[in-house]
Image (cartoon, helix red, strand yellow):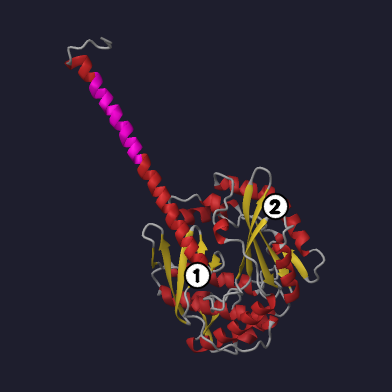
Amino acid sequence: MIFWLCCSCYPDFESGLDSYEKEFPGSDKDYFNYAFVPSNEAIFSINSKWLSAVVHIRNQLGDVPRTPVLDVIRWRNTVDSVLGLNALSIDFAPLFNHTLITVVDGLSDTYISYGPNNSFITKSLTSLENKRDRMLNQNPNSYPWETMDDSLRGTIVIKSVVNFASVISRLSDNNFPFYVYCDNKFSDGRAKDSGYVGVHCKVLVQNVTHTLQAELQIHFYDVMDGTTDCPKEYTHGIYEKTRSLSLTDTYDTSVINQEGNNAQKLVFLYGLHRIVPDPPQIHDNLTEADSYYYMWGSLFKKTFSSYNYSHYEVFSPKLGIYYPVNCITGEQDSIGLTEAEAKQVEEYLYSEHFIATSEVFAGTVVGAVVFGFFVGGIIVFVYRKYASNVPFFSFD
């Protein structure tokens, strides 16, 4: 097979992945740059193995504390443009880095990564502009620079479950200087489309005058080691290819999304297999329940129709209902919600829309009244000057 990226992670990543893929039926697909795509017959086995490993790790990690979600979705970057967001991210980078150093201090086989060559602690201005455009395309009335949460980002890489739990504990400690929201992607027993795993944290970095939402990911070494040659980075190439192919008319979108997700899930399973070689097997089908996530100011509901396909809907604050939407999985960029949290967000979005609509209506009424007085004044002015026997500006 042709590999997506080249560099050296754990030394046998490429050969090990190639060998692991041979355990499952499937084939390399030329339109995925010859990435291996497991066949439909292999998906049940892959999902079962993936789920068993994820549940085992979840149980070992224990509960991951969560800040109330309604507090988090109100967080804002105190900037008025993407250019300002980029500048604030650069200003806050040393403080963010220093804070993460204190989190990993004293933990063996645990380190901080800012991407390949540690070159990506801040997102480039071009990337921020591209994301702004995508967000404005989804919601033209939004202010993306206020809500983007990954202009400043980093990853803590961990080799053991014990240290993983220690990092979570330190982030949740009352002495930690910033507000943190942890989204534990191991906590959901459902088999996520792409198999993505990890803990994503939103961190509200702040000083006396400004606040900035930063992204902190926490990963096992065997999933993401900080180089380009690991499951997380490898699957990102498949994800990007899936997204680009799904936007063309050449391929069936549902088939492309399904194959792309299946290919990614097998790679993530390879990483999980290295962490938990032989977890207790779970055979329950937990994929039928709805799941929810919040991304870019919108609330999504995902219903699993089968092991291979998910049905997406987005919540309409105007109508108070969900309606179908064509969506590639947003698990990596989103906040996963429980059903109870989703209900809270529904009510919040609905009330915010009602308030905004009421303000627009009130503004329209006030404007109409002011305009009416203005027109009426002109009519009185003209009448008194040209059509009335009452002297102009007479106070008699």
The reply to whether discs 2 and 1 touch (Cβ–Cβ < 8 Å) is no
Q: Residues within 10 Å of mark 1 (few under 14, many from 20)?
A: some
Position of residue 327 measured from the top left corner of the image (x, y, whole percent): 45, 68
In the picture, measured across the screen, residue 98 lies left or right of residue 217, that is right
> Which residue lies under the disc numbered 2?
93
Residue for point 58% across, 81% down: 266
Position of residue 192 measured from the top left corner of the image (x, y, whole percent): 53, 76
Residue at the outermost right position: 106
Amino acid tagged 2: Ala
- Position of residue 111 relative to residue 35, above or below, is above
The boundaries of the magenta stretch are 364-381
Mark 2–mark 1 distance (CA, rounded to whole Å): 35 Å
Q: Secondary structure at mark 1?
A: helix
Q: From the image, give the main secondary structure of the stretch colored magenta.
A: helix
> Which residue lies under the disc numbered 1?
339
The quarter of the picture where residue 72 lies is: bottom right
